[in-house]
Image: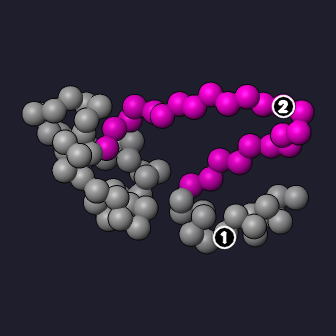
Amino acid sequence: YMAGGFVQDYKVNNILEGTRCLGYFDFKKNINITIDKQIVTAIPSIYKISLDNDLEFILLASSSLLKLIDYQELMNYIM
């Protein structure tokens, strides 16, 4: 990567959780590269998917939640 960062144990540089990245300026201050090439960026990844009548819900969860409960436990709780 241009900025020299890495992800380990779901953390940026094994320090920063993904959900905390938006305001963390220490990983966004390399003046030699553009903002979209920094270790952390606030530029979102946007995906477009087709929905149909079989879809019951969409679940958005942070990695912190998923460290406490696995997907099946989460689905059992919701359903």
Q: Is residue 45 magenta?
A: yes
Q: Is residue 49 magenta?
A: yes
Q: Earlier in the sequence, mark 2 or mark 1?
A: 2
Q: Secondary structure at mark 2?
A: loop
Q: Quadrant of residue 12?
A: bottom left
Q: Is residue 52 above or below residue 56?
A: above
Q: Quadrant of residue 2?
A: top left
Q: CA distance from mark 2 to mark 1?
A: 28 Å
Query: What residue appears at the point 16 percent right and 32 percent down from the top-left corner?
Result: 33
As rendered, which of 68 and 8 lies closer to the eye? 8
Q: Which residue is mark 1?
A: 69
Residue range (magenta): 40-62
- Where residue 4 is drawn, which disc sits there? none
Residue 11 visible? The answer is yes
Are dots 2 and 1 in contact, CB under 8 Å?
Answer: no
Q: Quadrant of the C terminus?
A: bottom right
As rendered, which of 62 and 51 lies closer to the eye? 51
Residue 26's x, y, as percent?
Answer: 22, 48
Residue 34's x, y, as percent?
Answer: 20, 29
Query: What residue appears at the point 79 percent right and 61 percent down from the top-left corner?
Result: 75
Within-10-Å neighbours for mark 2: few <14, some 14–19, many 20+: few
Q: Is residue 32 above or below residue 64?
A: above
Q: Which residue is mark 2?
A: 52
Q: In the image, what residue type sits under mark 1?
A: Ile
Q: Is residue 21 above or below residue 75?
A: above
Residue 45's x, y, as percent?
Answer: 48, 34
Q: Nearer the viewer, mark 2 or mark 1?
A: 2
Q: Quadrant of residue 58?
A: top right
